[in-house]
Amino acid sequence: MLGVITFFHWTVASSGGFNPPGEEDYYNFLVRGWRNGHLYLSKAPHPTMLTLADPYEPAQNGPFRLGDASYHDGHYYLYFSAVPAVLVLWPYFLLTGRELGTTTAIFGFAVMGFLATSTLWLRLRSRYFPASAGWLAPLGVGILGLASHVLALQRRPLVWELPIVTAYAFAMLALLLAHVVITRASKAAATAAGLCLGLAIASRPTYVFGAIAFLPLAWWVWRREGRAGSTLRCGAAGLVLCAVAVLTHNHARFGRMLEFGQNYQVTSIYEAKAVHFSLRYIPHNLAIYGFQAPQWTRAFTFVSATVDRAGPPGYLGGWNEPVAGLALTLPFLGLAAFAPWAWRGRSPDETRVVRCELLVLSGFFVGLAGVTLAYFLSTPRYLADFTPALALLAAIGALALERRVATTRIRPAVLSGIALLGCISLTMGCLLSFDYHQRMLRNLWPVGWQRLEAFFAAPPSGTPPH
């Protein structure tokens, strides 16, 4: 875990992180606005924006807009969630008198989510698979940190990545707390789980689809406690509190509770007229996220993500970013198919518990994957919405597979296969982190990049390797 966190830190640091906020730090524009007593950004629009016939028409606002901000009533608002500013950036300023960069906040939330996921993984392994091979524990930790595309959020730690990593952190905490509620009746854990789920949704509203994961949990608690139980009410209280806060904030800014600012965003398209989510996008995005072939080379970084600019009507293929398909680069994740074996051959009571655990994780993955695939573009940072849950299911699948063959002759071969898939996925996850965003690291860290290229360079023919 310490090794993964160290790699996280290096990734953010080598991407220009841990610097004072600059003019691209929208979140500190928001905090400055709050300090001045208003909800809009402390970034005045260009005077021409006030005179445009249609300020949302890209042909008119192009030279004057603050890209991706929401323009309303002569002010810029932050379309992206205010949760990181409320919980971290603003309190940091109140305590220190200094502004905290978005980059530093991203590192903190990434560590928080990783620790929560790793803790859940280790608890599930020790509770339900105590006889499993010891090396599977650190392998799972490595997969959750390095082969889950969370690194994509740290390679370019800016305004787009902060709400995603914040949602990831609170969602993983919610899943960990859900495990606590399943294993023992705890009103405090239920309240905290509801609150964390609410904060995840408030950070990234698409996480509301991941909330289907908590329906099996609610059913489990209801079956265990009946109508008289208060655990469900405690969990709902935290969730409702966050929902009320978000809706109130939306109404205060835009006059409508369900307006998050997307219809007022100023970008290179007319956002209010775009079809952002559609079922017709799912097959295309599934092919990209799952099976898009990367380019392979003999030179560092040996693998390069590719981009697909095509798509169905309404799909914004021109905004697509290079993606390497999960099935071709992170093969360990395919072990999620064996996760249902986890409850085989157990006592009836234990079977129900394990099944509930897996239904929660599977529901979260399916909900988040579904809404991500239905979006009108593809980018590696969106993989961080659902890949961590898939990685956790894959790690459980590895345990279930090992348990299934525990008394057979093929156990050594199966364990060797699991280890091989894990090593490939860990290596590819690290290599892809160097490749994110058109190899941004090459421009941000030119000296180090040249050293890596030289170290891995093949020697000329007839020359002994150095």
Image: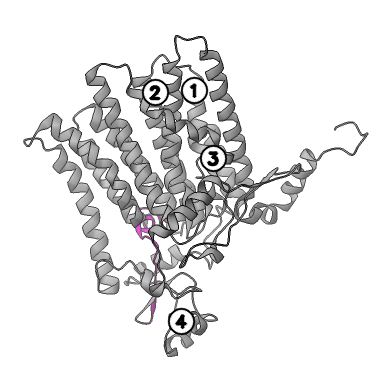
Helix, strand or loop at label 4? It is: loop
For residue 45, the mark is none
Q: Nearer the viewer, mark 1 or mark 3?
A: 3
Q: Give SS at disc 2.
A: helix
Tell whether label 4 touches label 1 (CB within 8 Å).
no
Residue 1 percent across, percent down from the top left: 50, 32
Residue 414: % across, % down = 53, 19
Give me the C-alpha separation between circle 3 and circle 2. 25 Å
**Residue where numbered disc 3 is placed:** 327
Q: Give, as a three-letter code, the residue at label 3.
A: Ala
Q: Is residue 460 visible?
A: yes
N-terminal of the pair, mark 2 or mark 4, is 4
Q: Give the residue pinned by disc 1.
A: 136
First in sequence, mark 1 or 4: give its number. 4
Instruction: Tell me the SS state at disc 1.
Output: helix
Residue at the image point whose x is 7% and y is 37% from the top:
227
Q: Earlier in the sequence, mark 4 or mark 3?
A: 4
Pointers 1 and 3 in contact (C-beta within 8 Å): no
- The disc placed on residue 125 is 2
Q: Real-space Cα distance between discs 1 and 4?
A: 54 Å
Whether pointer 3 and pointer 2 mark residues with C-beta atoms closer than 8 Å, the reply is no
Nearer-N-terminus badge (1/2): 2
The residue range painted magenta reads 74-91
Mark 2 surroundings: few (<14), some (14-19) or many (≥20) residues within 10 A? many
Q: So how many labels did they put on this image?
A: 4
Which label's residue is closer to the chain start, 1 or 3?
Answer: 1
Q: Which residue does the numbered mark 4 point to in the structure image? A: 57
